[in-house]
Amino acid sequence: MFGPSNKRVEVQNNDPEGATKEELFEKAEANFPLDQQEFIMQVWDEGYGEYCDITCERVGAPVKIRIVQVFPVQISADLLNSASSSIVTLDEFTPSVAETESNRSAETESSMDTNSELSEPEVRLEPDEAVQQGMTNTPATAFAHSEEGCSSGAVPEAAPLRVVSMALVHFRLPTPPPSIEKKLRDGSLLNLPERGIFLQTIYDAVVAATGSCLPTKMMYDEIINQMFTKYPSLAHPQPNMPIGNMKTLWKDRLLYKFRNNRRRSDQPMPEVQAKRKKTVTESSTGREWTLRQWGMPMYLPSRPPAEDDGTIRAHEEFLRREKKKRQPDFPHVKLAMDKTLSDRRQYLVMTQPRPSLSAVKERYPWLFDEDQLTAEMMRLQDTLIPVVRVFKEALGKYASALLTKGQGVKKPPKCFLDSLALISTHRIEKERQDATCKAAFLILPKLLREDLNHIFVAPNAVTDNPVHLKMNAEDILDSTEFILMADGEEITTSNSFFDAVALWLSSYYVFNLEYQKVTRTLCFTQRIILQIDDQLQIPKGVSTLTNSLNQINLRK
């Protein structure tokens, strides 16, 4: 948006991190009447609830951007002569501040007249040859000067200055313990405890520097940039990491760390309580509810302020049309799914009696897509981390104890014994870890006195569990396709064992389904593995098994 003009501008870019600032500036100049004037671009920050200057190198989509024209501020020669460096306060070059502060104290006036040393200002200006950017909503242009220019009385050549957030200027990435520092420098593998200590060190430093445990997106980007500058080895995938965008991976881990700390140790902090105590009092149905339900921050979210009944209907019609196309517009599909989340949740949760899945499929067909079902669970959890990643990492902590416990039960499932024998056949560590986690999950229902066949159903078998995974082979280890079924309706299909389990778990939340048949297995996975706290009492069998597994882990 630029003044009264609002346009939807698309930037074609294949980079998963988004478009560069240069690409955005080119689009802005091509779409708005800027007349070669200087301007800055500001992006909407959900954390602050206002526009902030773009400081990161790339901007992900979709975003809302505002263009602000920059007008030079002329500074008198007397003011230039009174300064001794290029760092000046906003009071010295902002006319509105100088005019309104008519009651400035005599001590301040005296210090200005005697050319005394400037105290450190709250906001600092630094020279920057690139486009102006910063953390305030009133960007300005000033003139840098030198002693030579001041002595001649002439106003020196203009140089752009930028306003910098003091929280980012003063923050420096902390140094972890020596052993971890050495591994980071050498590019050696960090184990889970070491990685936790490293991220905790960063968390403590951020809270100490900013006084907040809720950094903005731009602050996260700055921290990640400092991490990769100080430790270049982080850019190289390690054996316990998936190959992909390493900055995104570490940012997800940092987000996960901050979120966990806020949930556990930082609950008394005012900003955390302010986030958790929010309630929604207005909706299209007139109902009132809290944001957190069944352990989900966004189980019943409020409608975005910019949306109304008409725009929601338009989004839903667009989604139904795109689902029928051979090549849907996936970025716009994601955007429309985000905007319609509130109305979709009201329909699925608040409608009585509960709508059938066939009716849901007709109205919201994208929920029956594997990727969008995964994305919907992430929306409900308000996270960037897929359930399958959290599931595998957390299950790995109990996998060894589950195998130990499983080998002592009577008549364990054949698929468990077969998967147990396959673990040693894998030479790659990641494949061995996956095989261990698979065997651990296959023995879990048996340890909780439930039937695995209510989760994984063979082609010719039947089950009275309405939510299950239909296989294309008699044996779980031989199955190459898993069809998620719920209430007799085919939801989606996956070719991966872990992805299928994650979809099975997610479907209960996405479609507001009830736990049946394997309730203890679901409860253990929800409360112990995924750490989703619904404030309900944990069944005795689940707590007993958890205590037993913790005892086994302590003995190792």
Image: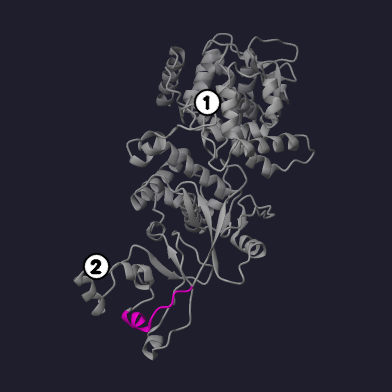
Residue 312 on image: x %, y %: 63, 36
Q: Which residue is drawn at 23% across and 74% down?
A: 109
- Mark 1 Cα shell of 10 Å, populated few (<14), some (14-19), many (≥20): many
Which segment is the magenta one?
72-82
**Which residue occupies the extreme right position in the image?**
326
* Disc sitting over residue 103 in the figure: 2
Question: Eyeballing the image, is 53 above or below 493?
Answer: below
Question: Eyeballing the image, is 27 above or below 509?
Answer: below
Q: Which of 33 and 264 is in front in this view?
A: 33
> Is 274 placed left or right of 327 in the picture?
left
**Which residue occupies the extreme bottom position in the image?**
152
Decide whether residue 233 is among the magenta residues. Answer: no
- Mark 2 Cα shell of 10 Å, populated few (<14), some (14-19), many (≥20): few
Q: Which residue is drawn at 67% across and 55% down?
A: 11
Task: Please name the residue that numbered disc 1 is placed on.
Answer: 399
Q: Nearer the viewer, residue 487 or 239?
A: 487
| Residue type at numbered disc 1 | Ala
| Residue type at numbered disc 2 | Asn
Residue 102 on image: x %, y %: 27, 69
SS at mark 1 in the image:
helix
Q: Which of 264 and 327 is in front in this view?
A: 327
SS at mark 2 in the image:
loop
Residue 134 on image: x %, y %: 46, 61
Which tag is nearer the camera, tag 2 or tag 1? 2
> Is 443 placed left or right of 276 in the picture?
right
> Is 478 placed left or right of 96 in the picture?
right
